[in-house]
Image (cartoon, rainbow, N blue to C red):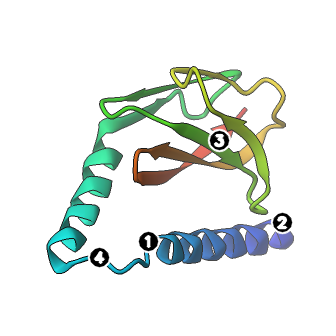
Amino acid sequence: MMKNYISFIIFFLFLSFGEMYSQTIDLPESKKDQVAVDNFVFNNSVRMYPNPVGNVLIIESKIPITKVQVFSLLGELVKEINTNFTSISLRNLNPGIYMIKIHAQNNSITKKLIKN
């Protein structure tokens, strides 16, 4: 149990650092606020259900999605989807906790996913 907890913390630290690093770019001052607003708007426009999920995950978004990635808590990419984002089959995943990263244009958000 403790090993899983430590792995979970390491994964979040890795994910947080990756997000900070991926968004550390030199932008004009007028564009910096726009990036934060875009991520906020994108996060609020995405709906993911059911969670916990059985076999099929539904993702709805007002902003066009370009890619969906599913990561284990160890940070391993276990599934990548490049088309048909509205209905994603997760039958081949073992029950557990996963992180799902949803990409759209220049934005991405990460959400927790529980697989039954």
Q: CA distance from mark 4 to mark 3?
A: 36 Å
Disc on the earlier residue, 1 or 2: 2
Badge number at residue 27: 4
Circle 1 is placed at which residue position? 23
Q: CA distance from mark 4 to mark 1?
A: 10 Å
Disc on the earlier residue, 3 or 1: 1
Question: Which of 97 and 44 lies nearest the eye of the viewer?
Answer: 44
Question: Which of 8 and 31 lies nearest the eye of the viewer?
Answer: 31
Q: CA distance from mark 2 to mark 4?
A: 43 Å
Q: Position of residue 9 (x, y in %)?
A: 67, 73
- Element carrying mark 1: loop
Disc on the earlier residue, 2 or 4: 2
Q: Quadrant of residue 80?
A: top right
Please tell me how crowded label 1 is: few (under 14), some (14-19), or many (20+) other residues with Cα within 10 Å: few
Circle 2 is placed at which residue position? 1
Circle 3 is placed at which residue position? 114
The amino acid type of the residue labelled 4 equals Leu
Q: Nearer the viewer, mark 4 or mark 1?
A: 4
Q: Nearer the viewer, mark 2 or mark 3?
A: 3
The amino acid type of the residue labelled 2 equals Met
